[in-house]
Image: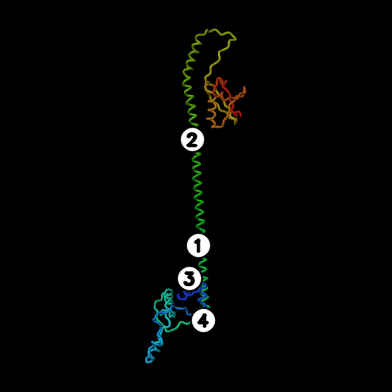
């Protein structure tokens, strides 16, 4: 709202408001209001009229029409009056303001002159204006409080939205990590299953290859027995060593538990190490040794067959830490 409209709402005429703002160099409503209250009875300068001024003595009617002139002077309108409420208004500006404020539309000219404000009326009007200013200031402060509260609510709401978005992002990242770990475990399990299946397939192939040889050895033994005499062999003659195709290996783990399985005597010691890894899932390096005689197997021992290492027909192998 402009300063002119604010002062007009307080009851001042538009012309006097504009002049008061001009005199006070438009420095605000309060200075203009003080000037208006201090110069209530003063006439404000008006622009010089054109050639159509008031009639002078030179162009006044002749004395013969004196009676009519007196009546005309007596009938000159000095103000305007609202026919709806009876309020006396000074000029057209006040009429327009009164009509806009009250909605009244019936006005007429009046010979009644609007009286100047008395000191008490001035004080009353000043108090009323100050009260209006105070009320407007309170309303402005209330609006500012409401605006500040709304801004604070928007700030808090924005902060909550950011926290919620951050929480959702963290949940998504956590889900990705869990899914990745799950996939890695599944891949590790699939790899172990492939190794186990390969070991089983190798065993089956070896048994299939060795079965004809075992049958041939059995036939040769039967033929040898049938060709010998019934006489007993002399005492002191040693029996030929027995041929073994399988050996039973018992592994003692580092935690005290044991594993046992049968292996072909031709298999290398590395097959026992792979068997331990598959059964226990251990991926860290380890070494193997025998307790009696005490021997820690070297790297090249893992490529030697079990029968060469003396682990036939059975043996106990201990799992230990690799040599530094």
Marks 4/1: CA distance?
43 Å
Q: Nearer the viewer, mark 3 or mark 2?
A: 3
The residue lying furthest to the bottom in this view is 64
Q: Nearer the viewer, mark 2 or mark 4?
A: 4
Few, some or many C-alpha atoms within 10 Å of disc 4 (few <14, some 14-19, many ≥20)?
A: few
Earlier in the chain: of badge 2 and badge 1, it is 1
Q: Which residue is mark 1?
A: 147
Q: Nearer the viewer, residue 208 or 52?
A: 52
Q: Nearer the viewer, residue 114 or 268?
A: 114
Q: For the residue labelled by badge 2, is the local secondary structure a helix, a strand or a loop?
A: helix
Earlier in the chain: of badge 3 and badge 2, it is 3
Marks 3/2: CA distance?
81 Å
Disc number placed over residue 187 in the picture, else none: 2
Q: Which residue is mark 4?
A: 118
Residue 238 percent coordinates (x, y): 58, 11
Marks 1/3: CA distance?
23 Å
- How many labels were placed on the picture? 4
Q: Is residue 163 above or below residue 305?
A: below
Residue 126 percent coordinates (x, y): 52, 76
Q: Which residue is mark 3?
A: 3
Q: Is residue 208 above or below residue 148?
A: above
Earlier in the chain: of badge 4 and badge 1, it is 4
Q: Nearer the viewer, mark 3 or mark 4?
A: 3
Q: For the residue labelled by badge 3, is the local secondary structure a helix, a strand or a loop?
A: helix
């Amino acid at each position: 709202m402009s300063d002119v409209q604010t002062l007009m709402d307080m009851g001042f005429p538009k012309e006097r408001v504009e002049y008061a703002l001009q005199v006070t160099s438009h420095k605000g409503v309060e200075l203009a209001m003080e000037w208006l209250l201090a110069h209530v009875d003063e006439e404000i300068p008006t622009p010089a009229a054109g050639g159509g001024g008031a009639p002078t003595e030179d162009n006044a009617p002749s004395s013969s029409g004196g009676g009519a002139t007196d009546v005309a002077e007596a009938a000159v309108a000095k103000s305007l009056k609202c026919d709806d409420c009876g309020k006396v208004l000074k000029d057209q500006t006040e009429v327009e303001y009164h009509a806009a404020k009250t909605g009244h539309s019936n006005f007429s000219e009046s010979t009644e002159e609007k009286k100047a404000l008395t000191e008490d009326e001035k004080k009353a009007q000043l108090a009323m204006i100050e009260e209006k200013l105070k009320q407007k200031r309170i309303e402005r402060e209330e609006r500012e409080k409401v605006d500040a509260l709304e801004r604070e609510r928007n700030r808090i709401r924005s902060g909550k939205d950011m926290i919620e978005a951050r929480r959702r992002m963290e949940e998504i990242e956590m889900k990705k990590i869990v899914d990745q770990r799950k996939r890695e475990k599944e891949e590790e399990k699939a790899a172990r299953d492939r190794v186990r299946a390969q070991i089983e397939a190798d065993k089956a192939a070896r048994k299939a290859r060795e079965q004809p040889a075992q049958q041939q050895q059995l036939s040769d033994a039967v033929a040898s027995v049938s060709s010998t005499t019934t006489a007993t062999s002399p005492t002191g003659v040693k029996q030929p060593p027995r041929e073994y195709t399988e050996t039973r290996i018992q592994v003692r783990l580092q935690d005290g538990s044991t594993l046992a399985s049968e292996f072909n005597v031709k298999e290398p010691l590395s097959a026992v190490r792979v068997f331990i890894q598959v059964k226990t899932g251990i991926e860290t390096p380890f070494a193997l040794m025998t307790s009696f005689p005490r021997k820690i197997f070297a790297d090249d021992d893992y490529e030697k067959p079990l029968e060469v290492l003396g682990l036939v027909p059975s043996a106990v192998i201990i799992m230990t830490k690799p040599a530094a």
